[in-house]
Image (tube, grey):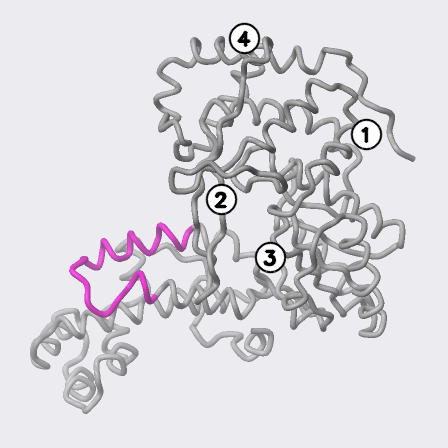
Amino acid sequence: MEESLFHLGENLFERLCDVNTLYNGFLAVKRNKGSHGIDGVSVEEFALNQDKELRRLSKEIESWTYKPKPVRRVEIPKPGKDAGVRLLGVPCIRDRVVQTALKQLLEPIFETSFSNNSYGFRPKRSQEDAIKSASKIVKSGKEITVDIDLSKFFDRVSHDRLISRVSQKVDEKKILRLIGMTLRSGIMINGVIVSSEEGTVQGSPLSPLLSNIVLDELDKELERRKLEFCRFADDANIFVKSVKAGERVMSSISKFIESKLKLKVNWDKSKVAASEKVKFLGMTITTKGVAISKVSLDRAMRKTRELIPRGTHLSIEKSIEEFNKWYVGWANYYKMTNYPAQLNKIEAHMRRRLRSRIVGEQKRRRYLAKKLIKAGVRKGLVFRHVYSNKGRWALSISSPLHLAYSNDWFAKKGLKTFSAKGLPHWFGIKEWIKLT
């Protein structure tokens, strides 16, 4: 049964105009950092006069002289070769403050009725929660995944339908009008302002909540049909027991998405397949566990090669520092894998590339031999490998290099690792290689 409308008269709008509400919004904007909008004002610059700016913003909203500025268009490369770019919009700081404050007021109203199967951009919910839930469903016997990809979801959201959905719970015209102004604020591309007649801008603090409001209609339809699913933002997977059932679900749900929600399904990327053949939030889910998907693992290997190139002026310590900046964040997410050998593969590859560089930096074989002997490696072992016909890449994995530049040596240099302690690079590879 649908919850009653949120009747507060003018209270919600009045709360938005309150300087304390805007201050809480600004604190969230400050924590998230981010770059400037089209006015060039940074978070730090706004903070210098925050009291004055927030009071002025409050008066402008209250008197309806406030007008959101167009967002600044930013192109972010998508991961993967020839994957194109993701179009983001960066609002001005003052607009981010208003949107964040508005989100903080609206979120509790909608949060209580959102589906338990929705995990994206929600308080106390994460991608890891979505993966755990999906894994539980697959292990229950529903091993076929209906993977529906929405084409340019954020660009295609209908403003009228969105405002209508919001109005079902917020019976306050001033708030609805403000949301409409935000949606239609426009985009500045190469100095030219382009109108935004549809879509909700990726990069806007309000967009995640609005996207969940739009897709909650899909969640409710899936629940009505008693289908088991997990959704994170516009990434939704539905789990069934057979391919035939999956094809029926794909057909009927796609029709619902395109006819009722007025969104578009990307048929090139949508599919019905065994769960181990589907990537969900960068992971592969099977009845045996959760693994980093082949696509994600391949990207990580490419990133490692970029960070540790063959020829560079950087010291070993600096290279490790640069690697850590990326890897700590990457591994903190992907450590949910049930196959730690996958993490170890990245770490082992990084160490091997650095050992290869050490070999390449020695202009003569005898210099390398002296270096290894000085590090405590037995002469006979050094000579047998160093004076062989092996190239630098083959030598990088030889026992003298591993003894002189062990995993512990790299750890003392500051390398951050997440795989099981002492795990050899080959451990468990037969298990997860089938999944990736």
Separation of residues labelled 2 and 3 (CA atoms):
20 Å
Separation of residues labelled 3 and 4 (CA atoms):
43 Å
**Dots 2, 3 in contact, CB < 8 A:** no
Q: Residue furthest right?
A: 1
Residue under label 3, please give it.
281
Lower sequence index among marks 3 and 1: 1
Q: Residue furthest bottom?
A: 389
Lower sequence index among marks 1 and 4: 4
Q: Tell me where residue 345 appears, x and y as whole percent.
A: 43, 69
Separation of residues labelled 1 and 2 (CA atoms):
29 Å
What is the crowding at mark 4: few (fewer than 14 residues within 10 Å), some, or many (at least 20)? some
Q: Is mark 3 on a helix, strand or loop?
A: loop
Lower sequence index among marks 2 and 3: 2
Q: Is residue 46 above or below residue 302?
A: above
Count of numbered labels shown in the rendering: 4
Q: Which one is in front in this view, the residue at disc 3 or the one at disc 1?
A: 1
Residue under label 1, please give it.
168
Q: In which quarter of the image is residue 61?
A: top right
Lower sequence index among marks 4 and 2: 4
